[in-house]
Amino acid sequence: IRKLQQELEEWKNGYADLTEVQRLRQDAAQEADQLRGEVESLSLKQSALQDDVHLKEEELSSLQADIQFAEAEKEENERRYSEIRQEMEELSRRLEDERKAFARVDSDREKAVKLLKESKENLLRVTKEAAETAEKCHSREAEISKQTERYEELARYLENDKEQLEQERAS
């Protein structure tokens, strides 16, 4: 009986061990299921993260392309700015030259105006002198005309006297 009790005790212990093993197996299976779920969840998260990484890499690539484009555009704008600045400097020099030329032209114009005023004064003086001279000439012409008429009259008178003398001599 003791033997049987011992066997029974051993069997109970074995059964308890077996139950413990089954319980441990069940716990392990549950943990395995739970871990599988976590692994699936982590796989999904990993996949999502890989998708996010891929998107971020595409965004980074796009941003790098944008940066390269912006740098190229910046260089082009700097080149254009430099060209425009040089053109503005050239135009400023030309404007300054034009201002100097305008100042010279303005000075020449002032000289021409002064010369024109002097010429006008000289013209008025010469015109006045010419008018005075013309008046003197008319007066002299009138005087010469009178003298010419007088000489012609004297010449006729002399001619008449000469004819009379000749007639008197002939008679």
Image: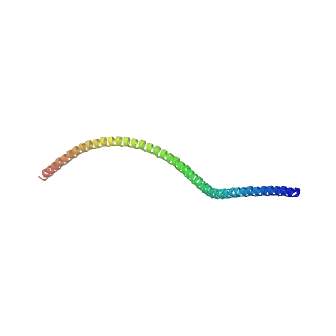
Horizontal side of residue 103 vs 34, given as left or right? left
Q: How is the image coloured?
A: rainbow
Locate residue 171, reporting x and y percent: 11, 52
Locate residue 145, reporting x and y percent: 23, 45
Residue ranking furthest to the right: 2
Horizontal side of residue 9 vs 62, given as left or right? right
Locate residue 52, reporting x and y percent: 64, 56
Horizontal side of residue 148 vs 104, given as left or right? left
Locate residue 66, reporting x and y percent: 60, 56
Viewer-side residue, 39 vs 131: 39
Number of callouts: 0
Viewer-side residue, 39 vs 4: 4
* Res 48 quadrant in image: bottom right
Horizontal side of residue 53 vs 85, given as left or right? right
* Res 67 quadrant in image: bottom right
Relative vertical location of residue 114 with respect to residue 40 in this rendering, above or below: above
Viewer-side residue, 153 vs 129: 129
Residue at 83% of width from left, 55% of height from top? 13
Residue at 83% of width from left, 57% of height from top? 8
Residue ranking furthest to the left: 171
Viewer-side residue, 18 vs 70: 18
Which quadrant: the N terminus?
A: bottom right
